[in-house]
Image (cartoon, coloured by chain):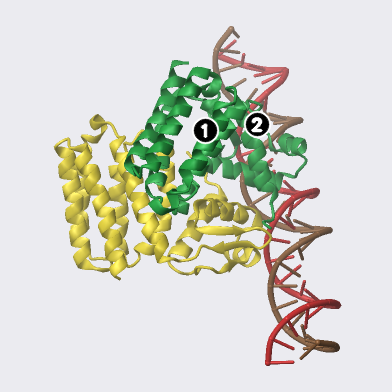
Chain colours: A yellow, B green, C brown, D red
Amino acid sequence: MAKRLLRGDLIEEITTRVLDGRLLADTRINEVHLARELGVSRTPLREALIGLADRGLLVAAPGRGFLVAPFDPDEARRLYPLVAELESLALRWTSPLDLSSLPDRLDRLAEEMAALPAGPDLSAVDDRWHALLLSRCGNPHLMRLIDQTKPLLKRYEAVYFGGTARAAESIDEHRGIAAALREGDLPGASALLIRNWVKALAYIERG
Amino acid sequence: MAKRLLRGDLIEEITTRVLDGRLLADTRINEVHLARELGVSRTPLREALIGLADRGLLVAAPGRGFLVAPFDPDEARRLYPLVAELESLALRWTSPLDLSSLPDRLDRLAEEMAALPAGPDLSAVDDRWHALLLSRCGNPHLMRLIDQTKPLLKRYEAVYFGGTARAAESIDEHRGIAAALREGDLPGASALLIRNWVKALAYIERG
DNA sequence: TACTGGCCTTCTGCATGCAATACTGCCGGA
DNA sequence: TCCGGCAGTATTGCATGCAGAAGGCCAGTA
């Protein structure tokens, strides 16, 4: 079994705090206070902070510690297309053979989503859907980049699944991707995947 | 002026040691010995090691510290196309206006390369060429991913610029990319850029 | 010989200590 | 009033300390 290190748990905890707004954009992080609050010492906390800065969720200010990265709509405009392209790549780099078992399972997840009201639960299943879609990609480096980048995007996604209309539309897009895969149309599926992300961004930008 | 932290210098130093073979693939890193050798304490060293593990140059083995990531030709087959796609994206996401000043400077660098014998110096100028090409990309997250990924590739590049023939060919490809940019043919330039990487990989795979 | 178990050493992971730098508030002068 | 300098505090960045886990060694056994 894989032993868990403190810094891993701390990265998770701090990430959720940034995403749910308990740590606000542009605020400085006080290592002593946060360590006390989390019940750990500064050492593993700093290790986690450094990791989060590498991922872009925090920014390191040498001599002044760490700040929560600024919240900037322009950043969303850059992150969504980036994740879209990365996921599209991961899909295109999955061998067709490995894809064959996915469409059925993807559709089952889509059904699950259709039964859920818009909200964080739906967003969580959406994550699982995308994770499943890319689960057979044989390029671990690309997957690492995706895993490191997607949390950034979640800050802006908060609004996203707020709308039931967009949720229904997105679920349809998911079904479309699964259908394309079933027909062996990988380029088509990849294009639809990009569209899914682009439309999500467009939805956010309207408010 | 930007204050430098120890962990930054250590990341650089350890990276070069992995790239030049002073730290061999699959070897365990002894924090006490390495810290002593580098003249620092274990704390900033561990911070650097964690960063390098995030980038994939080391792997973290919880409870057993860090290992130098294995050297695997298959990994090169995954890294080169990945970097190719990332750089291509970065180029396509540069605004044409910002690109206008580049071709002349790129060509000057290419001349510089043409005058150099194959070897690490040439490789360094090649790096500057690519960095200049992408210097105007307005997507900092993408640039971060590129900067974090390219060092991995350098382990496999060692052989690459060994051949004078390939070096000349590659410089020609660079000129071709600059020419395409001059004509405003961004898709063309991006395609040539991918080809440049793909051919580099092919050259490596032959030995 | 192959294997097991226990002892001992080494090393990691986390906690704590310490010095230098950055911040805050206040005061005096322009 | 606004700005600059100064003293005191707070906070970071790095060093060191410590407990427990991992790994090696060797004797004893099947």
Label 2 close to label 1 by CB (< 8 Å): no
At 67% from the left edge and 56% from the top edge, which residue is drawn? B2
Establish if B26 lies above or below A66. above
Q: Name the residue under label 2.
A: B17
Q: Do labels 2 and 1 share a chain?
A: yes
Establish if A87 lies above or below A116. above
Give whichever of D18, D4 is nearer the camera.
Answer: D4
For the residue marked with disc 2, what is the amino acid? Answer: Arg
Give the structural element (helix, strand or loop) at label 1.
helix
Quick check: can you spot residue B29? yes
Q: Which chain carries label 1?
A: B
Give whichever of B32, A187 is nearer the camera.
Answer: A187
Establish if A141 lies above or below B200. below
At 45% from the left edge and 61% from the top edge, which residue is drawn? A16
Q: Which mark is residue B110?
A: 1
- Residue D10: image quadrant is bottom right
The x and y percentages for residue A59 are 56, 59
Locate residue B46 relative to residue B104 in the image: left or right: right
At 48% from the left edge and 16% from the top edge, which residue is drawn? B207
The mark lying in front, picked from 2 and 1, is: 1
Q: How crowded is mark 2: few (under 14 residues within 10 Å), some or many (20 or more)?
A: few
Quick check: can you spot residue B130? no
The x and y percentages for residue B132 are 51, 43
What separation in Å lies between label 2 and label 1 (alpha carbons)? 28 Å
